[in-house]
Structures are given as C-alpha cells and as structure tokens.
Image (tube, helix red, strand yellow):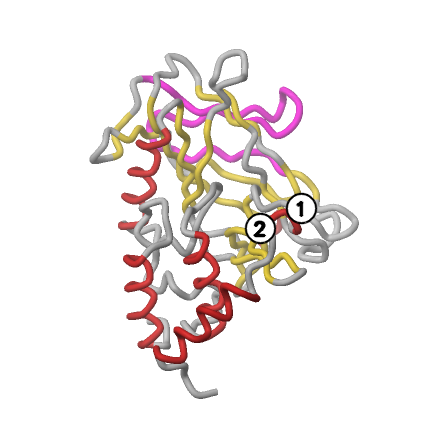
Amino acid sequence: MRRMNWDRAVVVMAASFAGVLAPVSSAQHLEDIAVGVRDGRLALGVFFVQGESTVPLLTERVFRASFDPLSPTSNFTDEPGFESLEGTFAPGLPIGYTLQSSLRRWNGSAFVPTGGERLQTRLGGIDTVRVSSLDGTPVVGTSRLVTPFGEFHQHLGFTLLDPASTGVYVIEMRLWASGGSPIESESFWMVFDKDDPEGAQGAVAALKAGEAVGACAADLNGDGLVDDADFTFFVVAYDALVCPPPGCPYDFDGSGTVDDADFSVFAVQYDRLLCP
C-alpha cells in the first residue's frame, strides 16, 4: 500500500476524530497494564479502544501508579493490575515477576538511592511477600496461573515501607513464564507517586528520554513499521490530549499529554517507515 502523505494525513485525522474514537466506557480493563506475547517474548503495554474492540498495544515500558491516600497508611496500592485478553496464553501457565533492581527515588533531576525505603510486594498469602533489595540484587517473586480461558489477570500489592516519605519512587521489573516460554519480558519501570503526581510526571519523562523508550517509539502496534495503522492509534490519542495512567505509549516525551511535540516525533518516524 502506498504511504500516506501528510495532506492525506490531515483528512484521515479529521475522519478519525469523527469515527474512530470510541467511548472509553465501552471498554473494560483500560486501567490495567496489558500483558501479551510479541516475537515470542512476554510484552507489556496498554489497552486501546478501537470500535467495539479492546486492543492491547504491547509497546509501553513505563507505567504509573499512586499509593492510595485513602488507605490506613497511604503506602499501599494494588493498581494497576496486569491483564491479558482471553486466549493469549496456554491455560495453567504460571506467570510471575522479578523486582529487577532496588527501589530508587526521583529527586527532580536524577534517580538516587532512597532514604531507606524499600518496596514490598505481595501476590496472595503471606508466603508470597517479597521485599526489594538495597544493593540492586534482583528479587524473584511468585507466580499465578493462567485461567482455563487463557487469560492472565492479577493485581500485585505494592507497599512502600517506612520511612515512606512523600515523593516519587521507581523500580525496574520483569515478567516471566515458568519454563521460559514465552521468553521473559524486557525490563519495564513502575513509577509510584506518594502525594506527588507532578513529580511523577518528571520521572516518567526522564525514563522515556533514556533507555526505556527504544529506537522506534511510534511503532505502536509493534509490527516493525510506523505506518497508517500506527497513525490510526496515534490520532485518537492526539485528539484526547491527556494521558491517563497506567501508561501512554503515544506520549513520546513523557510530558503527560499527547500534543504537537509528540506529533513531530511521530511525523519523523512515520516518514522513515522502517524501524531501525
């Protein structure tokens, strides 16, 4: 198919505003992290409403969460969850996680060691509790089974341990499947804010500017091309402007919005077509 020129792109954009954008209320699980398989490897991303369908875009690696201000200590959250569509995995497959790094704190310009805080995770009973290391040693968590319908849906409990100061924290994680198939996911980053949502946005931007983004961020469907299919996804997000948690693969610069700056990035990669 011939590539769309930018005059035609404007027409498609207008049509997309009128016809492609589906009500968010028509989709389920938009607040969870999408889990699936891409190129034989576990991959994560977000869910996207396309018509009457919910499509997983498995190209996001930076996700946001907030410690619940209504919890007794304000140091706990089990959102977002991790969820796949039905039929994604073999029934009964154990899928688990690893805390790949120590917990770090965002100081406004860099990620630095915490003041003693560590992250506790829990995926069930007391025997599933894990605590992040202080020296960066990976900590392997427990696993849960894929349902008989081929769906994986779990909410991992995260607790920020004392002194639990106000601020923004980040930890690197991976997902794995028992037996190594699918292959373990690439690293992804969970950014937690404790009463500091603006600071969290700065941390997301810093991660996206670094190694977490990859060389072809505009390839939203992960097919190795930045083409009309990706434009269809991007233009809807561009119209919505605001990026809600847990993640936003269309917000290439991590600003918290899908705006003209992101459009410029998309245009360059769209013109190149092939992902390096």
In the foreground, 152 or 90:
152
Image location (x, y in percent) of residue 128:
61, 26
Looking at the rendered structure, the number of numbered marks drawn on it comes to 2
In magenta stretch: residue 118: yes
- Kind of element beneath mark 1: loop
| Left or right of 260 on screen, residue 224 | right
Residue appearing at x 60%, y 53% in the figure: 23
Q: Quadrant of residue 33?
A: top right
| Sooner in the amino-acid sequence: mark 2 or mark 1 | 2
251 horizontally vs 122: left or right: left
Give coordinates of residue 7: x percent, y percent.
35, 79
The location of residue 68, given as percent across then percent down, is: 50, 23
Segment tinted magenta in the rendering: 116-143
From the image, tell me which residue sits under label 2: 35
Q: Nearer the viewer, residue 28 or 204?
A: 28
Which residue position holds label 1? 152
User: Amino acid type of disc 2?
Assistant: Val
| The furthest residue to the right | 148
Characterize the local packing of mark 1: few (<14), some (14-19) or many (20 or more) Cα atoms within 10 angstroms: many
Determine whether label 2 and label 1 are within 8 Å by CB: yes
Q: Amino acid at mark 1?
A: Phe
Mark 2 and mark 1: Cα distance apart in space: 8 Å
Location of residue 101 by image quarter: top left
Q: Which quarter of the rendered picture does the C terminus lie within?
A: bottom left
User: In the image, is residue 189 above or below residue 35?
Assistant: above
Q: Is residue 187 magenta?
A: no
SS at circle 2: strand
Q: What number is the disc on residue 38?
A: none
